[in-house]
Amino acid sequence: MLKSLATPVIWILVLLVLGLVLSRGRERTGRRRASWWAVLMGTLMLAALGLRPVGDLLAYSLESRYHPASQESLQGVDFVVVLGGGMYLSGGLRTENELQGRAYSRWYHGVQAFKDGGAELIAFCGGRPRENSESEANVMKAMAVGMGVAEGKILVETRSRTTQENAACLADLLPAGKARRIGLVTSAAHMLRAEKIFRKQLPGDTIIPVPVDYIYDPMVWELKSFIPSVWALEESTVALHEWLGIIWYALRYG
């Protein structure tokens, strides 16, 4: 529930609805002023977060901390861990479960990192979106097997639904060992939160960030960059969601 509310679209809707509610009833100067400010703030927030410069700035604040993993950093990695990012369930015109774009990028680059680094195992994390559905981890496993990864080298963690659960559940499944080197594959915008959680859950191991799925794009100064767009709003939403997640995890898990 909290995750669903941690999005700018909900904040904007709340402000606009509040403005409409306050505008009804008897005419009162204070009430009308509050109504006007609520609508104005909701409109300005929608316009600002829909601008490409704003979306890029928010994404850069997260992604600039992590550069793509080098070939050298992947050498000697014991395990590659790929975090789920959502999937579309079969139904309607879709005949099979499919990874969403963010999850597909993590899966693809995770498999490449596993092949390039020569790790012992690749672990896929992701539970069931619905009670009776297939887990995201098993969907990624099936795709990896289709790409030539030996089934015996794949570990699946199928219970988690959050980043915290990813790390906690996986810690119980990984083969025992000391000072293991673990390549952590997730979206660059998500890496700051994920890396902190995995370092806390696996304090004796070395966590090697493998950021993928970059959404920041160097700014091109042109007129359409200053016209609100759905793409820029999505970029802003992803970045703000991550910053809120970082704050929430810091308060809850320390």
Image (cartoon, rainbow, N blue to C red):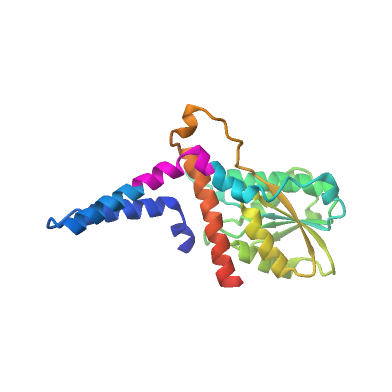
Q: Is residue 123 left or right of residue 159?
A: right
- Measured as percent of width and height from the top left, residue 210 is found at 73, 50
Residue farthest left in this picture: 26
- Measured as percent of width and height from the top left, residue 7 is found at 46, 54
With respect to residue 173, does 136 lie above or below?
Answer: above
Q: Can residue 51 be found in the magenta stretch? A: yes
Viewport quadrant of the N terminus: bottom left
Q: Is residue 142 left or right of residue 21?
A: right
Q: Nearer the viewer, residue 153 or 249?
A: 249
With respect to residue 5, does 216 lie above or below?
Answer: above
Q: Residue 84: in sight, yes or no?
A: no
Q: Residue at the spot x=47%, y=27% of the render?
A: 223
**Range shown magenta:** 43-55
With respect to residue 161, does 231 lie above or below?
Answer: above
Q: Is residue 186 left or right of residue 45?
A: right
With respect to residue 63, does 226 lie above or below?
Answer: above
The count of marks equals 0
Q: Nearer the viewer, residue 14 or 47?
A: 47
Q: Looking at the magenta stretch, what is its main secondary structure?
A: helix
Q: Can residue 104 be found in the magenta stretch? A: no
- Measured as percent of width and height from the top left, residue 202 is found at 74, 68
- Measured as percent of width and height from the top left, residue 206 is found at 80, 62
Q: Residue at the spot x=61%, y=72% of the render?
A: 254
Q: Residue at the spot x=45%, y=36% of the render?
A: 229
Q: Residue 168: in sight, yes or no?
A: yes
Q: Quadrant of the rendered structure where residue 112 is?
A: top right
Q: Residue at the spot x=77%, y=47% of the render?
A: 69
Q: Is residue 166 left or right of residue 91?
A: right
